[in-house]
């Protein structure tokens, strides 16, 4: 994929477009063929959503998915699925993790898996309060995965990528204070042993990505031939009625200058068939899971839909000619 051109990285400060403006730009210039839903079985009628892209371990292909009852919150599991004809079924003899929004990658020759752990934080003001953090597992295959570190409390969307300089790039998503609902940070570490709370909290924020009151996070990272990083993520806002709107987005990150190309929407919930939603206010949600890129300049995006279903869609490769 050396033909990809990623030289046009934004180096000047600019006021980022809002989700509404980004959506208008996307709809004016992009016409996608309709996506399709993925079919899952063997989960006793539970929802499967917020999936990964297919990944290979040995001679088998898997997808990870968040499995949850429609009415439940904070009771998710991440399971691994294999394809049987046109249906994804739970893979036998692979682990199940009590997590949300699983992810998978390979670092230093090891399989790295993780997700969001939800835990109780009871107070007099909120006797049903919960907290959350990202946890990481490592191993040579799915069955040998062992927990090895935990991210900071109240931080989701921590993702890792192997770099050409043999370091590990880490994207973070701090919230609260000046970071509001969530901005994206970046740091580099020498090895997996350096992935800890202190280092993660020291990540430098990538400026000028989200309009006031809006937020986003990284979901999957793609090392590019020129040393930059293609970032697949999500961007979101809440409207005046309280409904949430999540879109699949991408940008290219320059590790040398700590700058990124402008965020662009690459797919929306409207690009998929209509379907169920966990709640009415979550109907307009697409949560990026993973991207499979092809030599012909196209890609397949895998994503969660409305916190209830999962799908895939063919799109132009978002990391070409930026």
Image (cartoon, grey):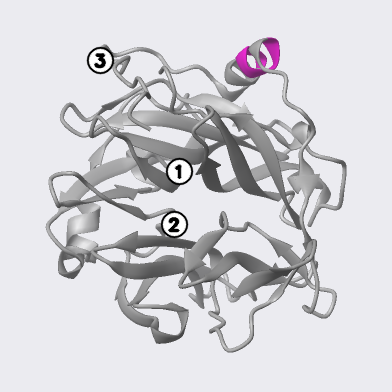
Q: Residue furthest bottom?
A: 93
Q: Secondary structure at mark 1?
A: strand
- Say left or right for 17 vs 151: right
Residue holding disc 3: 11
The foreground one among 233 and 216 is: 233
Q: Earlier in the sequence, mark 1 or mark 2?
A: 2
Q: Secondary structure at mark 3?
A: loop
Q: Which residues are magenta?
A: 24-28
Which residue is under mark 2? 156
Residue 83 visible in the snapshot: yes
- Mark toward the viewer: 2 or 3: 3
Quarter in which the N terminus is drawn: top left
Please name the predominant secondary structure of the magenta segment in the image.
Answer: helix
Query: Is residue 46 located in the magenta-colored stretch of the structure?
Result: no
Apparent side of residue 263 relative to residue 178 in the rendered image (left or right): right
Spot occupied by residue 294 in the image (x, y as percentages of width and height) = 52, 37
Residue 217 is tagged as: 1
Q: Left or right: where does residue 102 sit relative to residue 268?
A: left
Label 1 – label 2 distance at C-alpha: 8 Å
**Element under label 2?**
loop
Confirm or deny contact between disc 1 and disc 2 (CB under 8 A): yes
Which quarter of the rendered picture does the C terminus lie within?
A: top left
Vertical comparison of 312 with 110: above or below: above
Quadrant assignment, res 148: bottom left
Q: CA distance from mark 3 to mark 1?
A: 21 Å
First reached walking from the N terminus: tag 3 or tag 1? 3
Looking at the image, residue 201 sits to the left or right of residue 179; the answer is: left
Q: Do the numbered discs 3 and 1 sit on residues whose CB atoms are within 8 Å? A: no
Percent across and percent down for residue 143 are 46, 85
Where is residue 53? Give x, y as percent.
56, 54
> Which residue does the image show at 56% across and 57% down from the upper left?
52
């Amino acid at each position: 994929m050396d033909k990809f051109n990623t030289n046009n990285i934004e180096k000047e400060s600019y006021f980022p477009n809002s989700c509404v403006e980004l959506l208008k730009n996307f709809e004016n210039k992009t016409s996608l063929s309709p996506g399709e839903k993925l079919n899952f079985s063997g989960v006793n009628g539970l929802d499967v959503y917020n999936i990964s892209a297919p990944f290979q371990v040995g001679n088998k292909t898997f997808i990870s998915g968040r499995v949850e009852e429609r009415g439940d919150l904070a009771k998710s599991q991440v399971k691994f699925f294999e394809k049987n004809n046109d249906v994804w079924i739970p893979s036998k003899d692979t682990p199940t993790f009590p997590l949300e929004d699983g992810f998978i990658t390979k670092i230093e020759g090891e399989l790295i898996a993780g997700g969001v752990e939800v835990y109780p934080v009871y107070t007099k003001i909120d006797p049903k309060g919960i907290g959350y953090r990202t946890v990481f597992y490592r191993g040579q295959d799915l069955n040998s995965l062992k927990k090895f570190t935990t991210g900071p409390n109240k931080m989701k969307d921590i993702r890792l990528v192997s770099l050409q300089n043999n370091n590990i790039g880490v994207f973070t998503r701090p919230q609260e204070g000046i970071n509001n609902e969530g901005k994206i940070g970046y740091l580099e570490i020498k090895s997996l042993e350096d992935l800890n709370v202190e280092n993660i909290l020291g990540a430098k924020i990538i400026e000028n990505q989200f309009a006031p009151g809006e937020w986003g996070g990284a979901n999957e990272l793609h090392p590019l031939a020129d040393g930059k990083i293609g970032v697949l993520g999500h961007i979101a806002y809440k409207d005046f009625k309280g409904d949430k709107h999540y879109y699949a987005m991408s940008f290219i990150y320059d590790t040398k200058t700590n700058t990124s190309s402008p965020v662009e929407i690459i797919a929306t919930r409207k690009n998929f068939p209509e379907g169920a939603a966990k709640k009415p206010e979550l109907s307009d949600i697409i949560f990026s899971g993973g991207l499979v890129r092809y030599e012909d300049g196209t890609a397949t995006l895998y994503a969660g839909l409305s916190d209830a279903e999962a799908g895939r869609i063919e799109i132009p490769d978002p990391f070409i000619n930026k």
